Image (cartoon, coloured by chain):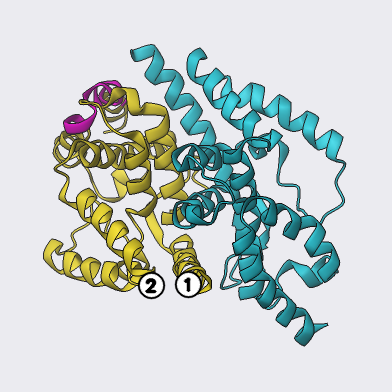
Chain colours: A yellow, B cyan
């Protein structure tokens, strides 16, 4: 028992570092950039509130667990902004190594279970993972809308790019949410570009 | 449907402010004070990892949901440090009003469900709430141990106070975790006071 607790606390203490991984998006009051720890809390809350809009029924407890661990590899890999120009293959290799290292801090049975949940999220094939991925894309859109466009002007994002990079993914898991966002997004681009 | 999404996003956008509520404890690298948003993520992860140590079996999905919303009233009420000298009755009145206002942003059915879950956490009577409260007390201890005592010297905390204010609460829900922490805490006080 004591050995298990030691290993679990080693993982949880390592996880603390996710609070120092900065994302491209800011808080809704634009006061500073968001970190991946608080982002993970916020989207778990998004999923808890918006589960009813999943395109197919989900097990919300599994979705929430996925979202709590979905970004933990960023402790080693950093955040790759969706509108940035990183190399996806190189990023994936770094993230796989990070998953090996970080989940490997846990007792073996938990390391396997957490890794399987993270792999499921990354593969985005099950209903739970598809919805989780959708929700992960919604929150930054809100942050951008709340901050006068946020990172869109920075990255010269067009409505068409937003539709491909974000809209298609949100629609796959939660079409009603994208429909609601689309109206606000269209209004923003009409007024600001 | 559109009205529900509008209300849900109003709640979720308000929740963003929890990322600006600062706590007494710092990150494990002592680089800055922790905020209540990232703290909520971290303890939800703690619960997910350490559920097996609950003194009685818990429904971990309910525990995680409780922890995701447990601090949201701090948007209005601020964080009351466990070793500080706030007035508990005044703090509770402010938190009740905050719960009315913030959960009240949600569609009525969800406002009731979230409020009931928060009330259950606050009352600390059910097995799920007792374990959730225990876990909420564990993470700051680790942050203090990782940062050379952290807030303990600031508040002149004694081992006896720590036992009463923290140990009793952790032990109530997760005695094995407190036993593991106690050894590290005793060693710290022996070496530093």
SS type, badge 1? helix
Q: Are marks 2 and 1 in contact (CB under 8 Å)?
A: yes
What residue is drawn where x is 46% and y is 46%? A41
Residue lying at the far bottom of the rendered structure: B191
Subunit bearing disc 1 = A
Instruction: Please indicate, yes or no, whether residue B105 appears anywhere in the rendered image.
Output: no
Of residues B15 and A140, the one drawn nearer to the viewer in this rendering = B15
Q: Is residue A22 left or right of residue B123?
A: left
Is residue A120 found inside the magenta-colored segment of the image? Answer: no
Q: Is residue B5 left or right of residue B129?
A: left
Where does label 2 land, which residue?
Answer: A105
Of residues B160 and B30, the one drawn nearer to the viewer in this rendering = B160
What residue is drawn where x is 21% and y is 67%? A96
Residue range corresponding to the magenta coloring: A171-184
What residue is drawn where x is 51% and y is 73%? A6
Can you give x and y, in whole percent of width and height, for residue B42 in the image? 51, 55
Q: Is residue B116 left or right of residue B171?
A: left
Is residue A174 found inside the magenta-colored segment of the image? Answer: yes
**Magenta segment main secondary structure:** helix
Instruction: Please indicate, yes or no, whether residue A171 appears anywhere in the rendered image.
Output: yes
Can you give x and y, in whole percent of width and height, for residue B103 in the image? 57, 24
Q: Which mark is residue A10?
A: 1
The Cα–Cα distance between marks 2 and 1, rounded to whole angstroms, is 7 Å
Binning the other alpha carbons within 10 Å of mark 2 as few (below 14), some (14 to 19) or many (20 upward) gives some
Subunit bearing disc 2 = A
Of residues B107 and B115, the one drawn nearer to the viewer in this rendering = B115
Binning the other alpha carbons within 10 Å of mark 1 as few (below 14), some (14 to 19) or many (20 upward) gives some
Can you give x and y, in whole percent of width and height, for residue B180 in the image? 61, 70
Q: Earlier in the sequence, mark 2 or mark 1?
A: 1
């Amino acid at each position: 028992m004591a050995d298990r607790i030691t290993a679990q606390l080693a993982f949880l203490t390592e996880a603390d570092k996710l609070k120092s991984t900065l994302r491209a998006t800011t808080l809704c009051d634009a006061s500073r950039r968001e970190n991946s720890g608080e982002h993970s809390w916020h989207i778990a809350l998004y999923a808890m509130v918006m589960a009813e809009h999943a395109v197919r029924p989900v097990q919300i407890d599994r979705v929430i667990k996925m979202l709590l661990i979905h970004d933990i590899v960023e402790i080693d890999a950093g955040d790759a902004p969706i509108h940035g120009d990183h190399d996806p293959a190189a990023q994936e290799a770094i993230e796989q190594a990070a998953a090996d290292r970080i989940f490997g801090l846990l007792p073996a049975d938990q390391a396997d279970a957490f890794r399987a949940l993270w792999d499921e999220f990354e593969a985005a094939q099950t209903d739970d993972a598809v919805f989780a991925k959708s929700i992960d894309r919604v929150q930054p859109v809100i942050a951008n809308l709340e901050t006068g466009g946020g990172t869109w002007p920075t990255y010269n994002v067009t409505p068409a790019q937003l539709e491909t990079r974000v809209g298609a993914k949100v629609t796959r898991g939660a079409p009603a949410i994208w429909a609601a966002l689309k109206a606000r997004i269209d209004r923003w681009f009409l007024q600001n570009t």
